[in-house]
Image (tube, coloured by chain):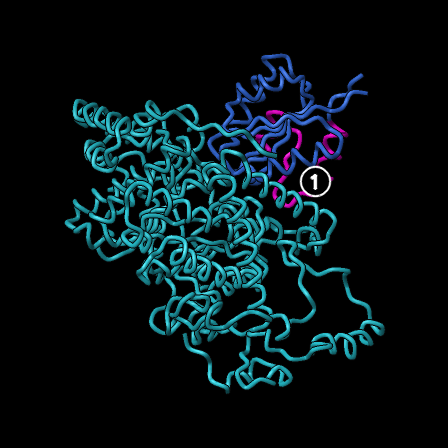
Chain colours: A blue, B cyan
Amino acid sequence: MRRIRVVIAKPGLDGHDRGAKVIARALRDAGMEVIYTGLRQTPEQIVNAALQEDADVIGLSILSGAHNHIAPRVMELLRARGLDDVLVVIGGIIPDVDMPRLREVGVKGIFLPGTPMQEIIDFINTNARARV
Amino acid sequence: MAIPPRDDLLQFCHPATLQSPESHPYNGVDVKTAAETDKERWERQTLEPALKASPERARAFTTISGAPVERLYTAADLRGVDYARDVGDPGAFPYTRGIHASGYHGKLWTMRQFAGFGTPEETNRRYKGLLAAGGTGLSVAFDLPTLMGRDPDAELALGEVGKCGVNVTTLADMEALFDGIPLGDVTTSMTINSPAAMIFAMYLVVAERQGVDWRRLSGTIQNDILKEFIAQKEYIFPPRPSMRLITDIFAFCASDVPRWNTISVSGYHIREAGSTALQELAFTLRNGIEYVQWAIDAGLRVDDFVPRMSFFFNAHSDFFEELAKYRAARALWAETMRDRFGAREERSWKLRFHTQTAGVSLTAQQPYNNVVRTALQALSAVLGGTNSLHTNSLDEALALPTAEAATLALRTQQIIAHESGVANVADPFGGSYFVERLTQDLKEGSRAYFDRIDALGGMVAAIEQGFPQREIAESSYRFQQALEARDKIVVGVNAQVQGDEAPIAILYIDEQASDIQLARLERVRKTRDAARVERALESLREAAEGSANLMPPILEAVRAYATVGEMCDALRAVWGEYEEVPVI
């Protein structure tokens, strides 16, 4: 079976990349193939990366409060490219009131500060699309 | 240097160490117990039987940075440490015990709460509230578009305007931000780095319009680009032209704004990115050394600009390691300025620093626990002799703080200052075997890092090779693994977890600020003299291509109401933009 391929992306202007880098490494150590996009990626760049890398999962790291703009745009572009089955998860600082809207647009996992790495690994293993 | 009188010896030393009449409390070489030290005897006679009776909780005990600590520290741990040479009295070289002879007797630290959100008007109201509540200095948090030199209408600014701080795009915003606040009477710290010259120029023009002489102005700009490349990543231009902007500011302030702190060399962000205490200390001071070297290379005299350099450290959760870190920083800077750069003035030797409690230690879970964490962290900063302090609010793992939470954070400092009694004595932990040992260890570890970075060709070269970035990424991952293994405990997160927490009220910043700022920008663009703006930006581009000081053309562009984005674009056109190779 092919290994799960994950694109970890830092959208927006924020440069706080500690979380993105730690999760990238933890997923890699858990046997996944991880592509880290680097900083300041637009939704278009992120979706392009997912397409080119044949990613099963996109992990967005957002701490700046721009999630309400970024996540819906990423989901829209994924649908437009026929990548509906790519699992999208967000890690970062997300106020409770914003969560229902993010889930509505199709974000499957939202991981707040203090989430154990293993919980994220398990979530991805369970929810990433099946590959043959 | 004063050698303490004999009376002190009795307080610091076990009697067995006092065999020589000239022996000194820290001078462990004088410990004349040939076969076995007191500590070794204690281990054999007292400790070993105790361990047999009851085992210890863990195999090894380490600081939060992973540095091993022993069970007990005694005079034997301070062998070779000379009080006068390595520690020194308060107010005396190398200032381990503080830069003021009377500690906090003369003046308490400045209680400087970092704040900024939404529009300049909203933030102006928060500032007036903080000053009314007894805050003694202002500290501006800018939003990401401002920090990154992008106007609110830029594509990458979408959804970011006013979210993490206040949006300041033109002089009109700066005027609104300080409306009714006399700039001659307050000191203002501005956390701004890549566009520091532009934002500082705006502040200077507002002061000018209030009729305040620049020579009277006091405050700080962070202006520390090296830690942006290393940790926080809010860089715009490549390292070398970025360094020129900084040395231009040093030179401009030395002649025109002499009381302004031209840089706040920051370990805070390095620590937040996951470094150890030692890495925070070593990389920050090595960054300081880099700025001094570049300014000297640009033709400045060391004693003309070093006294206006200031520092900014994190106050993390490991109480003793932190307070030792501040003490080590002071001694390292003093010796480096005197011995490496030949600084002659005492003001160049004295390291002044701001401290902020560790944002990264705050938990979204059980947020009231954060009040306790912050109080302990703040206490370590005060015991380490900080010159100013920001205490985080309990809700900052969730959002920017509410006014109530920010007030409680300020009250935490006031309680430490006025009720705890810790400000009554200079360096009260001086002489603690443990704290003195930790202080020396941190100094030695830092010197080893200085040597490695010197060998790489200096900090700019080390950054280009990814050295500090790799060191930090490694420490950060190691700490995460320690959390996962529960080798390190965070209460409420990987222990004492509670499932039934009621949510707390947070500050929610909506899109209104963005709309207001976009409208104001449009108004400014319509009413300003477009030809003057164009001329000013052209002069700035020309100056960037040459080697003249950049502050005068930036001041002219600011007066013409050029935007931060336009000014940065002028420099981008000449210098290009930096792109990092990510290090995981």
Q: Residue B219: x, y in percent?
A: 30, 52
| Residue under label 1 | A117
- Based on the picture, tell me whether residue B245 belongs to the magenta stretch: no
Quarter location, residue A106: top right
Q: Amino acid at mark 1?
A: Met
Camera-nearest residue between B521 and A46: A46
Camera-nearest residue between B420 and B524: B420
Q: Residue B45: x, y in percent?
A: 78, 79
Using a 10 Å C-alpha cutoff, classify the residue at mark 1 as few (fewer than 14 neighbours), some (14 to 19) or many (20 or more). Answer: some
- In this view, the residue farthest toward the left is B211
In this view of the protein, can residue A94 be seen by the observer? no
Which part of the image, by quadrant, shows the N terminus of chain B? bottom left
| Chain identifier of the residue bearing label 1 in the image | A
The stretch of residues the image draws in magenta is A100-127
- In this view, the residue farthest toward the top is A81
In this view of the protein, can residue B560 be seen by the observer? yes
Q: Residue B446: x, y in percent?
A: 53, 53
The answer to whether residue B498 is left or right of residue B181 is: right
- In this view, the residue farthest toward the right is B52
Q: Residue at x 37, y 53 (%)?
A: B341
Q: Residue at x 47, y 27 (%)?
A: B579
Q: Which secondary structure lies at badge 1?
A: helix
